[in-house]
Image (cartoon, helix red, strand yellow):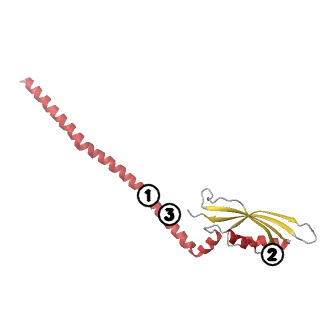
Amino acid sequence: MKRKAISHDYTITTFVFVFTSFFLFFAIRPSLNLIFTLNKERADYTTINQQLDKKIEDIIRAQNNYIALAPYIDEINQAIPNRQVLTDTREVISTGSPELVNFSVQESTLLPLAGSQLNVIGLGTTLTGTYPSIKSYLTTLRTLPRIVTLESVAITHGESTTSGSLNASVQLQTYFYHLP
């Protein structure tokens, strides 16, 4: 009889072990996997929500900047046009009392500067005139509606020192906004 009791104990123990293993594998394991997956998704959604909040703040900031700059959009478009307008630049540069002897455009690429959407165009002018007219010309460059950077100025006297004529070589840079 004792053998039957020991055998019966093994049967019950085996049954309990198999039932517990079955329960752990098919009931608790999927629940634990679901808990870990949901925690990961919650962390991902929190990160995404924070990034979206930052993007929304950036959009609001950009909108406020646009509203603040809206009255000046025409001036901004004149200062940095969205197309290459060399003929307009030449007309503005050449209106002055010194005589425009030469106007040249340095070779430029149509690709924007690194990390920017601005393109740079180098311009060269050679002028002949008196000192006050050349000075006036350089002063008007500063008041142009378009952004023009004065890179270098070289002034030499003309062949005749009695005429008061000077030759000026001016190197400029102008910009235009590259639309993608």
Is 45 positioned to the left or the right of 1 in the image?
right
For mark 3, give the secondary structure.
helix
SS for callout 1: helix
- Horizontal relation, residue 126 to residue 33: left or right: right
Q: CA distance from mark 2 to mark 3?
A: 49 Å
What's the residue type where badge 3 is placed?
Answer: Asp
In the rendered view, tell whether residue 127 sits above or below residue 45: below
The residue carrying pointer 3 sits among few (fewer than 14), some (14 to 19) or many (20 or more) residues within 10 Å by Cα, namely few
Q: Please say if the residues under marks 3 and 1 sit with CB atoms less than 8 Å apart.
A: no
Question: Residue at the location (84% across, 67% down)?
Answer: 167
Residue at (54% x, 70% y) in the render:
66
For marks 2 and 3, the one nearer the N-term is 3
Which residue occupies 23% across, 44% down?
Answer: 27
In the image, residue 175 sits, relative to residue 39, either above or below, namely: below
Front disc: 1 or 2 = 2
Residue at mark 1 = 50
Cα–Cα span, label 3 and label 1:
12 Å
Tell me which corner region of the image, top left, top right, bottom left or bottom right, holds residue 132.
bottom right
Residue hosting label 2: 97
Q: Residue 54, how many percent across, how many down?
A: 47, 60
Q: Position of residue 44 (x, y in %)?
A: 39, 52
Query: In this rendering, which labeled residue sits more in front, label 2 or label 3?
Result: 2
SS class, disc 2: loop
Q: Earlier in the sequence, mark 3 or mark 1?
A: 1
Dot 2, how many residues are within 10 Å of its Cα: few (below 14), some (14-19), or many (20+)? some
Cα distance, mark 1 to mark 2?
A: 60 Å
